[in-house]
Amino acid sequence: MRRDKFEPLGVPDIAGRGPDWSKSTEHEHVGGRVTALDRWLARQLLAAVGDPPFRFVLWNGETAAGPSDKHTLEVRFVDRGAIMGLLYDPELRFGDLYSSGRIEVEGDLLEFVETAYRALDAKLARSPWHHRLSRLRNRPRTNTLSGSRSNIHHHYDLGNEFYRLWLDREVMQYTCAYYPDPTMTLEQAQVAKLHHVCRKLRLEPGQTVAEAGCGWGGLARFMAKHYGVKVRAYNISREQVSFARERAAEEGLAERVEYVEDDYRNIRGDFDVFVSVGMLEHVGTDHYRELGGVIDRCLKDKGRGLIHTIGRNQAGLMNAWIEKRIFPGAYPPTLGQMMEIFEPWEFSVQDVENLRLHYARTLTHWLERFDRNLDHIEDMFDERFIRAWRLYLVGSIAAFTTGSLQLFQVVFERPHTNELPWSRAHLYTGDHPQ
């Protein structure tokens, strides 16, 4: 069924605190006279975003440009309110204005976003107050027990059919793939990622695994099928859990994989292995010690674990628009912040790998499939939703290619464990268990 609004799950489409310039029912200034104030506002906006090589085109066709002599990209404004909204809060307002069609980008959207990120990064590096101001204007949603359920519902319960259109066809992985060969298909790279994770965990037949945040259950089924382990996987997305259970039954794995519709904080039992792929972004730093306590409680004396997460080199909030409109409650941690999971419980970090460019390639594959399936997506959602999600995918590619975001895989063990590999050779043997 087609959804007629961008707020598909009841989350109000508010633009945060402050004057709401990003929305109006009428574009009073379309075709109207451009004033000296409008020209001044356009110049101020260019300076505010670091004078990137863009040309701003106002609603009467007039242009404004920064000092660069290379203006291959144009940003078109429908009305004065769009400029004022961007001046007030460019990080949040741009996405809303672009989604509603009040801003248009002429030229390659990815090139535009990458250029904007680089210009803003250079500008904000000289403005230490920016992150404090952004936090005051755009406070992230909380990840309490009830808050987490609402946040996950907003993003993951859009409908399995929607995600099936552009994720890999084999295991429905909505996390970074692994491309040891850059020419791999998305399906091949996602299978390679699953093997990479399992090898890092050194899984053996008969072991028990606790998985926190299992998505559509692909990793749990893969571990059970190819590595002979038993898995209990926790997830608070009802649609994903329902899908995962059906697939496990179809593949004859229901007795070896248990999907629990519950929060990671309620994991119970004793396990040889703990794994979390793409869930930490939804935990929040205030709950890292709590997560570490859950892992300590459920992991056996010689247990080990792996956490795979989007991250940052320096502490900072998720892009305000993505956090409010796409991924509520999301926060990408630094490696230093992740130590709050491990240090209080004396876990030893054994391996850290950064797969940043692998995520950029994964997202590129997702975007290609998203674009190929626009006809089907248009039957499900309206134009505003489609523009928003396309911007989200493009913006995510740019975040990884420009280094704004990282992708960390961290392997950890109990501190007294001496049964450790002497090299990383086991990760790259080329032999996959059947």
Image (spheres, grey):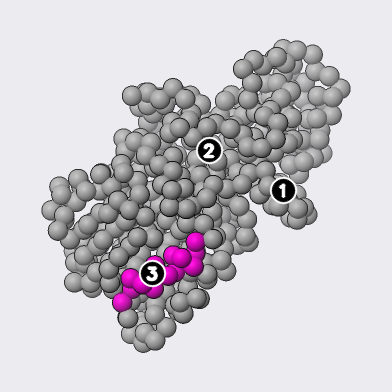
The amino acid beneath tag 3 is Ile
Q: Secondary structure at mark 2?
A: helix
Foreground mark, 3 or 2?
3
Which residue ends up furthest to the right in the rendered image? 36
The residue positioned 25% from the left and 44% from the top of the image is 242
Q: In the shown orientation, is residue 99 left or right of residue 410?
A: right
The residue positioned 43% from the left and 52% from the top of the image is 145
Q: Residues within 10 Å of mark 3 (few under 14, many from 20)?
A: many
Q: Earlier in the sequence, mark 1 or mark 2?
A: 1
Q: In the shown orientation, is residue 229 left or right of residue 238?
A: left
- The image shows residue 104 at horizontal and vertical percentages of 62, 27
- The image shows residue 368 at horizontal and vertical percentages of 43, 38
Q: Earlier in the sequence, mark 3 or mark 1?
A: 1
Magenta residues: mostly which secondary structure?
Answer: helix
Q: CA distance from mark 3 to mark 1?
A: 35 Å
Q: Is residue 407 visible?
A: no
Q: Which residue is mark 3?
A: 295
Q: In the shown orientation, is residue 387 left or right of residue 224?
A: right
**Stretch in magenta:** 287-300
Quadrant (top left, top right, bottom left, bottom right) of the N terminus: top left
Q: Secondary structure at mark 1?
A: helix
Q: Residues within 10 Å of mark 2 (few under 14, many from 20)?
A: many
Q: Which residue is mark 1?
A: 133
The amino acid beneath tag 2 is Arg
The picture quadrant where one finds residue 82 is: top right
Which of the numbered marks, if any, corresponds to residue 311? none
- Do the numbered discs 3 and 1 sit on residues whose CB atoms are within 8 Å? no
Q: In this orientation, which residue lies closer to the viewer: 110 or 340?
A: 340
Q: CA distance from mark 3 to mark 2?
A: 31 Å
Q: Which residue is mark 2?
A: 325
- The image shows residue 97 at horizontal and vertical percentages of 62, 29
